[in-house]
Image: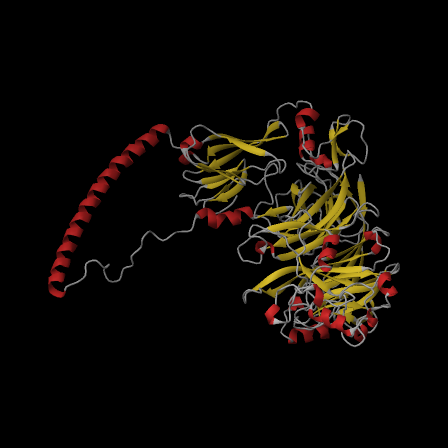
Amino acid sequence: MDLVFSVGIEYCQHLGQTEPVKPRVPPVGNNCGLVNSSLEFKLRRVPYRNAVIPEGEVVARAWGFSLHQAVATKKQWLTSLSPVFLPEADSYLTRFAVPQTYSYSVLLVDPASHTLYVGARDTIFALSLPFSGERPRRIDWMVPEAHRQNCRKKGKKEDECHNFVQILAIANASHLLTCGTFAFDPKCGVIDVSSFQQVERLESGRGKCPFEPAQRSAAVMAGGVLYAATVKNYLGTEPIITRAVGRAEDWIRTDTLPSWLNAPAFVAAVALSPAEWGDEDGDDEIYFFFTETSRAFDSYERIKVPRVARVCAGDLGGRKTLQQRWTTFLKADLLCPGPEHGRASSVLQDVAVLRPELGAGTPIFYGIFSSQWEGAAISAVCAFRPQDIRTVLNGPFRELKHDCNRGLPVMDNDVPQPRPGECITNNMKLRHFGSSLSLPDRVLTFIRDHPLMDRPVFPADGHPLLVTTDTAYLRVVAHRVTSLSGKEYDVLYLGTEDGHLHRAVRIGAQLSVLEDLALFPEPQPVENMKLYHSWLLVGSRTEVTQVNTTNCGRLQSCSECILAQDPVCAWSFRLDECVAHAGEHQGLVQDIESADVSSLCPKEPGERPVVFEVPVATAAHVVLPCSPSSAWASCVWHQPSGVTVLTPRRDGLEVEVTPGAMGAYACECQEGGAARVVAAYSLVWGSQRDAPSRAHTVGAGLAGFFLGVLAASLTLLLIGRRQQRRRQRELLARDKVGLDLGAPPSGTTSYSQDPPSPSPEDERLPLALAKRGSGFGGFSPPFLLDPCPSPAHIRLTGAPLATCDETSI
């Protein structure tokens, strides 16, 4: 199949007699380069191994999960929407990037027009969904040079004085609302989606948009009105939650009291309508999720606390008290207990809302929490029900003003009526409270002084769904998938700080990771994620990546398909492959709950995995990786009988290289009644000088033994003579000046034991784990822990791995 493009793309072209260009990775076929992007050309799928590219043909190649990136003879990068064809790998990644354009951090999906809007630095894109190669539309929203100079005069860096798009929202059927930092002077405007040529009707964005990307903010459109949580001043010291409609002085906003908002870091804003609750007498509610600083009531320690706040869309503020201020602003702690009973999971990173179809249940919030303490790499995932949040907001208030009762719940008798913070419902209107403007001052005064609830919001199951100590999650999205049996499961996609995507399924009260996918050629944080049907769209600093979430073809056998426990995938006996079932049942099997391979799959012939030869040097420590096919597998190692020192690890097996350690190693994983070898290695000597013969080894050992005895005897003799002479000097000195021989000599320090030295594994393991993006057969390559005594060059089946002074291969 050929795809026709009329825009630039990363590709390789036969250059004929042109000066060769050095690619980043070993070339395939011919040299790589770029041509003018204004020409229309074809993209043809070809095998990437030993490919011979005909002259004049333009061909895209894939190596791993990234396209070859090449430098043209004109030194010009021309990149655009680039489908990735992976003939021998999982072909479900497609990338979009433009040279010199960064921070693809704001994504907006419009399902009606099948369009993805991308907000980046100085630029807004409109891409057709799913990515098909159609030329993207583009608006350049640049900061005037005079404005940038003024930004630099204020002490800001050149890279900071740009317009970083922070808000993209659907204002109505014909226009988008957008806001950007505009070189520390936020601006907002609208875009006509039919023409998509420019940002029109510019106005100040203060109170809607942050001044810089580092200031966490959140915004949501509800009923054609923008609700924003950001900072109002240049220094970022005045947090604000606003309903931005009409003139700025008419906005409804939070009060400036620190009891309302205290240095918050906003992460998400979600609007829920009464229809989603099944409530005909309700008002639209807007929930804001954030982490703020709070002082512990029993000490002066400042801690970070994750919280949720709610306001009502019909809030008009008070008549005298709380004029132009929220009268429905209430907030509560979010509790996601971790290994340290909640303190370890005190920073809220992201929140996603899963909205079932109307009548199929209420929405649910999934939140990612991390630790505020340095060195504690902890991530936890918790689920919260909106009805539980409502229950807490209808519960007791916490006293914040009076020191004698500070931190204690307010007694029910001290709470005025109507209840402070409630949305104006039909029931309240019958009591002659038609709007918040008619609320009495005692109610408004109470809500001004008591915005915080006394009880926290607990997770839906009373505990986290997932806690991990080796992965830092930053972003989450979720959707509900129907399995082959008709039962629904929540599937979560978790983006990490090093650019990995974890797909996890919620089975009962447990969330289990099914798949780990490296998204980018180089590690970088995941900045945003959106779902569109079966496609996941991921934004990062350098690109937008589209991931196919229904690619079941990656599972090659019946056992792999069943053991993956993916609700989307089922094994087809008719097609003899793993397929997305799409509601069909004929000839398909699936088992999400127990993954019983023995009863569902025919006995498969024993698979012979690829055996990787690992050349090693004497006295090295090598880690042989083993990655089970799913999170439920249990694995054991088979190793040579002569190995003496080995250490099982979470990521594999650590082996100390000795003559007896040479030979075959196999990692066998068992799950669902089936066992298979998922990794196999063979340790061999890297060179002849590293392969000592047995006779040489025995002889060297005996010679070393006798030399050691001789050296020890001489050492003891010398030490004895020195001690005797020192004793004689000390006796003479004592007779003269009366020295205390019980104290250590001057200039020395007494140790009860030797000072601890850092472990090589402690120093090197984080670096080694940080390089797990690429590997062999789906798992990381072996890596060395200890430096080698000789400068041997380590190689694995012809691929360069590491020299002796390197940490990882």
Question: x and y percent of residue 259 in the render?
Answer: 66, 69
The residue depicted at 72 percent of the width and 35 percent of the height is 553
How far across and how far down the image is residue 90, in percent?
Answer: 69, 39
- On-image quarter of the N terminus: top right
Residue 263 placed where, x, y %?
64, 67
583 relative to 299 in the view: left or right: right
Q: Position of residue 745 (x, y in %)?
A: 23, 60
Figure check: 69 above or below 563: below
Left or right: residue 614 versus residue 27 is left
Say left or right for 68 vs 355: left
- The reply to whether residue 110 is in sight is no
Where, by quadrant of the figure, is residue 595 drawn? top right
Q: Quadrant of residue 558?
A: top right
Residue at the image point whose x is 32% and y is 30% from the top:
698
Q: Is residue 586 above or below residue 216?
A: above
- The total number of labels drawn is 0
